[in-house]
Amino acid sequence: MEAHVREVLAKSPADYTEIRWEEVDRSRVAFQRDQLMALERSREAGGIVRVLVGGAWGVAVFTDPDDLPRKVEEATQLARAAARHVRDPIRLAEVPPVQDRFFPELKIDFREVPLEEKRRLAEGYNKIILNFAPEIVSTAVRYTDSLRRLIYANSQGTYIEQAIPDVTVLLLAVARKNGDIQQAFESIGEAGGYEIAQARGELAEAAAKRAVDLLSAKPVKGGRYTVVLDQELAGVFIHEAFGHICEADFLLKNEPMRKVMELGKRFGVEALNVVDDGYIPGARGNVPYDDEGVPRKKVYLIKEGVLSGLMHSRATAEKTGMEPTGNARAVSWEHEPIVRMRNTYIEPGEASFEELIAGVDHGIYAKGAFGGQTEFEQFTFSAGYAYEIVGGEIGDMLRDVVLTGNVFQTLRNIDLIADDFQLKGGAGGCGKYSQSPLPVTDGAPHVRIRDVIIGGR
């Protein structure tokens, strides 16, 4: 394959050419209530050619490597046609050519585990939830694994082979009593082997218990509160509400937000540091090399409270006079790479969790994330569950907790950051421009925020 790819690249008539080939082995098991909904193993392979001619891209996808010469010509013709109408020519920031191979070791290679064993594992978790209490009326349990083997090469001399594993487990419980329905879930996702999915019975039980407990939880009273976010919710907040507006392709299309996101502007207290990191062992967002062949790089989006960096592809880096950061990612071989997050997190502070709680007379401790949306700088998130904070102590369980606000004001209102950092790779993924779900990891310590608007009764 390598010799073939290099030969095709050498003969390309385009100004710049890149080829990405991907082979994926995956399996999936899904239960809903007492029904097996999916039991499947699959393999797919395909590739994409992208060429640059006269400042315009041309793209062609293929499933047979023998078609590569024809697909390069097809993409070149498309780029030439587009170049006749281009007003803002695309240019790529310079990066050194790379020759590398990266293949992580798996403790237990999930490709060698029989599908029937995976079914039994998922069924066992499903039974734990179903049998937990009479109030449990439904479940959703899902196991997935995949191994992506990627070849990337370009006409500037880069040739990379890498493998990216991914294992996820979703455990959801639905409880009902007197017409009231509540749900809770636990999930895990890591870049590793089958062992990640094993021995997770305590998570299944935790999801079931929380769904039942939420039936008797108090609905939150709407208002403004000092809120302590747990590691999961703080990580989702920094990814969804802030991370996406640090993606340079978004800012290049949005002039008002570009003026707001000026490097050097203070966005929070000195203890606030926000990072997007390309490689953390075991994290789902790992991309040793991105889909433009750019090496991983740790990017400080906020350093000591000040906006200090953005995430870039080669094109956005050249356009803004910055350096590529290794954030060009595609969800599969059928898509072009766009600027995407990897492992995004708030670095730990120095306070203890007890200090965060002790300073609150009347507030809310919000835990977990149950969905949400962002619209430029405005956000709305639903916590999975929450507790009252009364006189510096954790009080009664709360439900229906929805946090809303302006991300920049919220960052400025962070007044204390704990030292109990956790990374969380869930069973879902990030979506952008119809490319979903892309594996990512979020993280944070506990974070305390003043004056948060909470929707409720």
Image: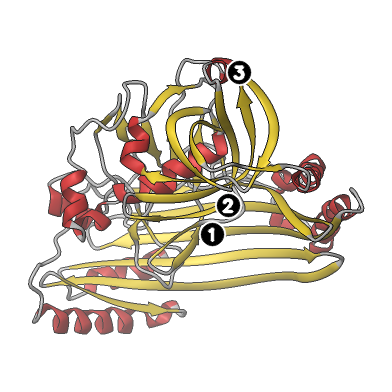
Q: Which mark is residue 391?
A: 3
The answer to whether residue 93 of the structure is visible from this angle is no
Q: Does label 3 or label 1 sit earlier along the sequence?
A: 1
- Assign the N terminus to one quadrant of the image: bottom left
| x then y, percent, for residue 229 | 53, 33
The answer to whether residue 418 of the structure is visible from this angle is yes
| x then y, percent, for residue 382 | 55, 49
Q: Amino acid at mark 1?
A: Arg
Q: Which mark is residue 165?
A: 2
Identified at 35% across, 43% down, the residue is 407
Q: Does label 1 or label 2 sit earlier along the sequence?
A: 1
Tag 1 and tag 2, C-beta contact below 8 Å: yes
Distance, label 3 to label 2, CA atoms, is: 46 Å
Distance, label 3 to label 1, CA atoms, is: 51 Å
Q: Which mark is residue 148?
A: 1
| x then y, percent, for residue 421 | 53, 27
Which structural element holds mark 3? loop
